[in-house]
Image (tube, rainbow, N blue to C red):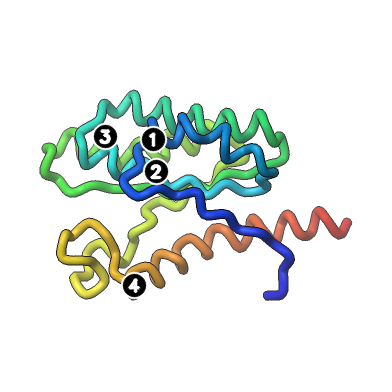
Amino acid sequence: LGWNVTVQNAGVSGETTAGGRSRIGWLLNEEVDVLVLELGGNDGLRGVDLQSTKQNLEAIIDTTLATYPSARVLLAGMQIPPNLGPKYTEQFRKLYPAVAEQYDRVTLIPFVLQDVATVDSLMQDDGIHPTAAGHQVVAKNVWKQLRPILEQMRKKETT
């Protein structure tokens, strides 16, 4: 699109919300206009206490918004397979909307793996991680929510 933006990937394979919470200060050494927060899936797969996961996500968001008051957060919602039982699985699914609704400057992607997680050809053999083609769909899911945020920010810059 010819937009002047810088994207920094601070993702770490296998990361949990606790790990992200411990690293957010480092990430915020660089100015952040939009933080795409996609953590928690590994918490859910490990059966981490949901209150801990929620508190970690909130701490990451709170730290980001306190450091950069005009920043926005795009929270990528996750879901997990039902192997930890229906109650945990359902509570995990509700966690992301509950976090997002607390904030004016947080936009929720309801499920970042929408149209990917249930399509065998878009998932690796582990059934958890997308293939390269699956990542293309994930990118579209993210872009659908990210583009309006960036467009809004661009309008503010020109007015």
Q: Gap between marks 3 and 4, in whole Å? A: 30 Å
Would you name the residue on which mark 4 appears? 132
Would you name the residue on which mark 2 appears? 39
The reply to whether the C-beta atoms of the residues labelled 3 and 2 are less than 8 Å apart is no
Query: Where does residue 56 sit, x and y in percent of width and height?
Result: 42, 29
Amino acid type indicated by mark 1? Thr
Q: Gap between marks 3 and 2, in whole Å? A: 16 Å
Nearest to N terminus: mark 4 or mark 2: 2
Circle 4 SS class: helix
Amino acid type indicated by mark 3? Gln
Measuring 40% from the left and 64% from the top, which residue is drawn there? 138
Circle 1 SS class: helix
The reply to whether the C-beta atoms of the residues labelled 1 and 2 are less than 8 Å apart is yes
Mark 3 or mark 1, whichever is nearer to me: 1
Nearest to N terminus: mark 4 or mark 1: 1
How crowded pointer 2 is (Cα within 10 Å; few <14, some 14-19, many 20+) is rated as: many
Q: Quadrant of the N terminus?
A: bottom right
Mark number displayed over residue 91: 3
Q: Compared with residue 29, is residue 33 higher up or lower down, i.e. above or below?
A: below
How crowded pointer 4 is (Cα within 10 Å; few <14, some 14-19, many 20+) is rated as: few
Amino acid type indicated by mark 2? Leu
Would you name the residue on which mark 1 appears? 17
Circle 2 SS class: loop
Measuring 42% from the left and 40% from the top, which residue is drawn there? 97
Mark 3 or mark 2, whichever is nearer to me: 2
Measuring 35% from the left and 30% from the top, which residue is drawn there? 53
